[in-house]
Image (tube, grey):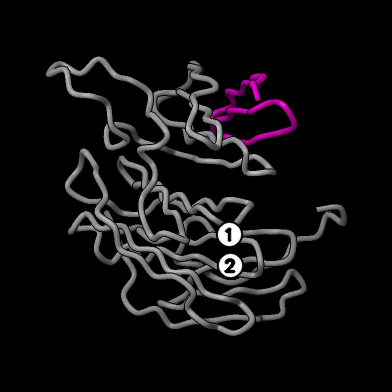
Amino acid sequence: MREGAAREVGISTSALPAVDREHIAYFEDGIIIVRKHDGTRIFEKHLGQLGVLHGGPAHACALLPNRRVAISRGHRCEEQLADLTVFDLDSGREEHRVELPAATSYKTFAPAALRGDPRGELVAILGYHAGLVLVDLAKGIDVADAYQPDPLDLADGRPTHHSHHSYSDFAFDAEGERLAAAYRPGKLSVWSRSGGVLKREWVATNPKAQRIVTFDEGTVGFFDSLGERAVFAIGS
């Protein structure tokens, strides 16, 4: 970005390639590919079937610390199973593989995006329609329930679950001390690493907009694809 340079990387079957300081990762014809920013291909792995939903990609990837890439194929979305596999970029070795039940208010749980913790311990899987799975890589379990979702006034009095929310983005701050989620219709939640709720906010936004959440030092920013934006101070 400092040089203002652009480079074509090829046609990706993933709506959301992953980028970090050194690499870009994307899918192509059932293969996960990772390149350096100079174009050098350093990793590729044939994955088999990838999930497709409504004619579009239902699979996602994320680059993790210590030169790793995480992928969710989405191939078992009809069974409401969230899959996650982590590969080491240097050795090509598979480090983690899990399949976890995913609660969702729809009949499928297809991955729309993955977000990696800067500590390399957690990976968030955002459901295409609704739901959130937060994988603890060391334990191989879903810990999303440790982060209380935004309460809803449900007619039958049930406790609110992440399955009731449609999450469009998820972020960790630079130290991994705070987590944030953006979800419909223009809402934002921020949690501490230990699970405490730091902030709930609502931003007026077009329901068709795509929402993005990101951290800066001491603040969290909420943006949408139609131009709405807000920045909030957050506690420790």
Query: Magenta span covers which residues?
Result: 212-236
Cβ atoms at labels 1 and 2 below 8 Å apart: yes
Q: Position of residue 124 (x, y in %)?
A: 46, 49
Q: Nearest the camera: 208 or 203? A: 203
Q: Residue at x 71, y 80 (%)?
A: 40
Front residue (pair 129, 85): 85
Q: Quadrant of residue 176?
A: top right
The type of residue carrying mark 2 is: Ala
- In whole angstroms, how far apart are the C-alphas of marks 1 and 2? 5 Å
| Magenta span dominant secondary structure | strand
Q: Earlier in the sequence, mark 1 or mark 2?
A: 1
Residue at the far right in the pictured view: 3
Q: Does dot 1 land on a helix, a strand or a loop? A: strand
How many dots with numbers? 2
Horizontal and vertical percent position of residue 178: 59, 35
The quarter of the displayed image where residue 101 is located: bottom left
Q: The C terminus lies in which quarter of the figure?
A: top right
Mark 1, residue position: 18
Residue topped by disc 2? 25
